[in-house]
């Protein structure tokens, strides 16, 4: 694909939604009105068909149970949770009590991107089977005492059905169920831009594999196109961006000059225009040795800016990490921090370090973490960030490898290390369950080469339950503790 950037065309792209996220105010997606205001392409909403299955005079929840009385409770809660579901359109809402009713429902389900299946009562397994056999990605929501049919979810998963179980009495988790079942549809709408030679596990660097497995379109963009876009940036716009977003809020500026920070802001505006021109949600760049740093500067600040906006900017053309970040953005609404992990077994800890990190690790609506502007450590050039992450915060460290396995673990940030100013600028020490075992089996024998073995992505929050639920919906297996 060949894109050219006229000055007028670039300015139109760069000026859209000035002062706001170009592609959305929430990482989950946005309303049609927000898309129009921000200039985001008008992707159709993700259509999730909700359906209730129950019957009267069931032994569970109780013989006097009337499913028609239960449906309004869920409907009110779903309406209350709408703002947490972003670009989802909930359709349907039928109460199904017989197999004949289920048979009439199936054609409607096949028109949706996914199904929210709410289980109300015991004795409906044949009906549930009909709905699952419709073949749509399905979130199976079952409160305690709704019946025992939840036991069959694993059997359906083993048979290759894209279904996840939500067994909880907390109705707020309906929003989580909807967002999980919407992930694949969300990933098929925008696209992923790759600048330069992609890196990662062998399946992940082949665009056709990524499309077939995850639904994501990969768009190659040349370094020359990036340079062209960079040249087209209005210097005054770049200066204003640098001043407002980086220079004024910084706790301190150590090595970089003002001019270097402006150059980095110009790189961000070029990346933003490239994303807009390609209708893309994510960009990854072969930045170490793959682009002229003296001309463009490092993209570190630009990646941070995109991540803070709810988009994805990933370094070193790492396809596995980029896809992981994109998936977590859509599933959980949080950005990722790509790191180079290293171990300190004396503290039962993994240290995560890199020269680019989000400042809004809680998501686009969260507060910015304090940061210092530094150079890129490897060559002491450009502009990069030293972000002060939150001590005491639980984190999930994850990476989708080979397009079919999520390696994941949890930990807790116990310190922001200061070890003789060594290594990449942003660093956190995370206490883990068993650092020695993790070190002995790093990568679980699934990856080879520098980038696949080295990078992991850190996210705020313990996301392991969500990762397990997402796995059957997206078609990957999970290896925990690695």
Image (cartoon, rainbow, N blue to C red):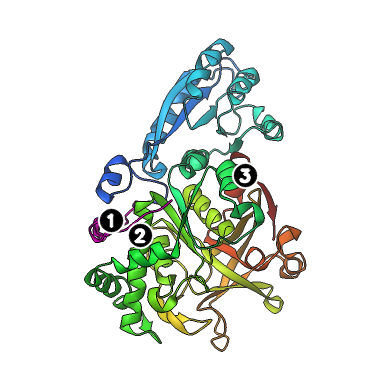
- State the image quarter where residue 228 is shown: bottom left
How many other residues sit within 10 Å of disc 1, few (<14), some (14-19) or many (≥20)? many
CA separation, marks 3 and 2?
31 Å
Quadrant in the picture for the C terminus: bottom right
Most prominent secondary structure in the magenta stretch? loop
User: Could you tell me if the residues under marks 1 and 2 are in contact, i.e. CB atoms within 8 Å?
Assistant: yes
- Closer to the chain start, of discs 3 and 1, is 1
Magenta span contains residue 22: yes
* Segment colored magenta: 1-24
Q: Which residue is mark 1?
A: 13
Q: Residue at x 71, y 69 (%)?
A: 435
- Closer to the chain start, of discs 3 and 2, is 2
- State the image quarter where residue 309 is shown: bottom left
How many other residues sit within 10 Å of disc 2, few (<14), some (14-19) or many (≥20)? many
Of tags 3 and 1, the one toward the viewer is 1
Q: For residue 428, which numbered disc appears in the image?
A: none
Q: Which residue is mark 3?
A: 471
Element on which disc 3 rests = helix
Q: Which residue is mark 2?
A: 272
Residue 172 seen anywhere in this rendered image of the structure: no
Q: Nearer the viewer, residue 425 or 234?
A: 234
Q: Is residue 444 above or below residue 423?
A: above
Q: Residue at x 37, y 35 (%)?
A: 79
CA separation, marks 1 and 2?
8 Å
- Going by the picture, which residue comes out furthest to the bottom? 420
């Amino acid at each position: 694909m060949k894109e050219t950037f006229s000055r007028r065309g670039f300015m139109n792209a760069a000026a859209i939604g000035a002062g706001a996220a170009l592609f959305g105010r929430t990482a989950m997606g946005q309303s049609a009105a927000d898309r129009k205001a921000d200039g985001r392409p008008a992707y159709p909403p993700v259509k999730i068909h909700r359906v209730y299955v129950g019957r009267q005079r069931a032994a569970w929840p109780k013989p006097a149970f009337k499913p028609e009385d239960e449906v309004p409770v869920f409907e009110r809660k779903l309406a209350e949770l709408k703002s947490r579901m972003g670009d989802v359109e909930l359709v349907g809402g039928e109460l199904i009590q017989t197999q004949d009713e289920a048979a009439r429902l199936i054609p409607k389900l096949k028109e949706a991107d996914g199904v929210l299946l709410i289980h109300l009562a015991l004795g409906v397994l044949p009906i549930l089977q009909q709905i699952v056999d419709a073949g749509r990605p399905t979130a199976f929501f079952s409160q305690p005492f709704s019946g025992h049919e939840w036991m069959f979810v694993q059997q359906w998963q083993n048979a290759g059905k894209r279904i996840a179980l939500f067994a909880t009495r907390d109705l707020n988790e309906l929003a989580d169920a909807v967002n999980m079942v919407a992930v694949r549809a969300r990933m098929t709408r925008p696209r992923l831009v790759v600048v330069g030679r992609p890196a990662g596990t062998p399946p992940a660097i082949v665009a056709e594999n990524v499309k077939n497995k995850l639904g994501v379109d990969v768009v190659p963009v040349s370094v020359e196109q990036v340079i062209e876009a960079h040249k087209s940036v209005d210097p005054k716009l770049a200066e204003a961006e640098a001043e407002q977003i980086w220079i004024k809020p910084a706790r301190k500026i150590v090595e970089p000059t003002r001019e270097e920070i402006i150059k980095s802001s110009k790189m961000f505006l070029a990346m933003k225009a490239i994303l807009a021109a390609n209708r893309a949600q994510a960009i990854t760049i072969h930045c170490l040795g793959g682009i002229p740093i003296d001309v463009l500067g490092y993209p570190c600040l630009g990646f941070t800016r995109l991540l803070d906006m709810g988009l994805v900017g990933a370094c070193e053309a790492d396809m596995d990490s980029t896809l992981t970040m994109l998936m977590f953005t859509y599933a959980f609404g949080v950005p990722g921090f790509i790191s180079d992990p290293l171990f300190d077994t004396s503290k039962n800890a993994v240290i995560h370090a890199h020269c680019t990190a989000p400042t809004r690790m809680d998501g686009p609506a969260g507060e910015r973490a304090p940061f210092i502007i530094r150079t890129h450590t490897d060559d002491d050039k450009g502009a990069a960030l030293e972000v002060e992450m939150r001590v005491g915060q639980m984190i999930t460290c994850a990476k989708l490898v080979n397009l079919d396995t999520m390696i994941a673990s949890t930990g807790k940030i116990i310190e922001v290390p200061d070890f003789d100013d060594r290594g990449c600028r942003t660093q956190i020490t995370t206490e883990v369950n068993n650092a020695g075992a993790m070190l002995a089996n790093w990568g679980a024998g699934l990856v080879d080469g520098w980038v696949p073995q080295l990078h992991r992505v850190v996210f705020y929050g313990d996301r392991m339950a969500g990762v397990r639920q997402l796995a059957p919906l997206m078609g990957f297996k999970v290896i925990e503790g690695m």
